[in-house]
């Protein structure tokens, strides 16, 4: 009897680089809006942090391609960096009075992206 791998067991591995591209686009778009449009210096700093998190996401997308050495570990490390960067951006944005919705957006988008990519990395098999 031969063991076969079902398609459902490999789909997280195939989606991992694409999820990093989508995460980098979402976090980078938010970071660009904060960095380029905001009138407050602390929001520009938070936007710069989010742009840095987006660059990490692009690097993670390249490190999780099909022929990469250890895509799970690279993705989990990048997810942790993205989560910490999102929390740091939310703390910087909270330096001045801001609405709760703004803080949830600045901190929530990177955390949600990091959580999704971490779950896909944990579900991915070699």
Image: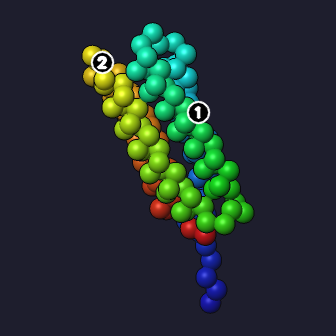
Residue 94 image offset from top left, x and y in percent: 31, 25
Please name the residue that numbered disc 2 is placed on.
Answer: 96
Residue at image x 36%, y 24%? 93
Of the residues under marks 2 and 1, which one precedes in the sequence?
1
Q: Is residue 118 above or below residue 42?
A: below
Label 2: how many Cα within 10 Å (few below 14, some 14–19, many 20+): few
Q: Is residue 112 visible?
A: no
SS type, badge 2 = loop
Residue in the image at 49% along x and 32% along y: 50
- Residue 1 coordinates in the image, percent (x, y): 62, 90
Mark 1 secondary-structure assignment: helix
Q: Is residue 66 above or below residue 78?
A: below
Picture coordinates of residue 86 (x, y %)? Answer: 42, 37
Question: Can you tell which mark lies on residue 25?
Answer: 1
| Badge count | 2
> Mark 2 against mark 1, which lies toward the viewer?
2
Q: Is residue 36 left or right of residue 98?
A: right
Residue lying at the far bottom in this picture: please name it: 1
Instruction: Residue at 27% x, 22% y: name it.
Output: 100
Q: Position of residue 89 (x, y in %)?
A: 40, 32
Q: Residue furthest top?
A: 39
Relative horizontal placement of residue 57, taking residue 49 as reference (left or right): right
The CA distance from mark 2 to mark 1 is: 26 Å
Position of residue 86 in the picture relative to residue 12 (left or right): left
Using the image as rendered, state which of residue 122 and residue 45 is in the foreground.
45
Question: What residue appears at the point 55 percent right and 16 percent down from the top-left corner?
Answer: 36
């Amino acid at each position: 009897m031969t063991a076969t791998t079902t398609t459902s067991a490999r789909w997280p591995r195939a989606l991992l680089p694409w999820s990093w591209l989508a995460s980098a686009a979402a976090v980078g778009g938010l970071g660009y809006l904060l960095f380029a449009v905001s009138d407050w210096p602390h929001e520009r700093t938070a936007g710069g942090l989010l742009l840095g998190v987006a660059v990490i996401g692009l690097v993670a997308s390249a490190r999780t391609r099909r022929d990469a050495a250890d895509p799970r570990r690279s993705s989990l490390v990048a997810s942790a960096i993205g989560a910490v960067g999102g929390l740091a951006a939310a703390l910087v944005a909270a330096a001045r009075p801001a609405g709760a919705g703004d803080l949830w957006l600045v901190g929530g988008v990177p955390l949600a992206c990091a959580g999704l990519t971490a779950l896909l990395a944990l579900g991915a098999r070699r």
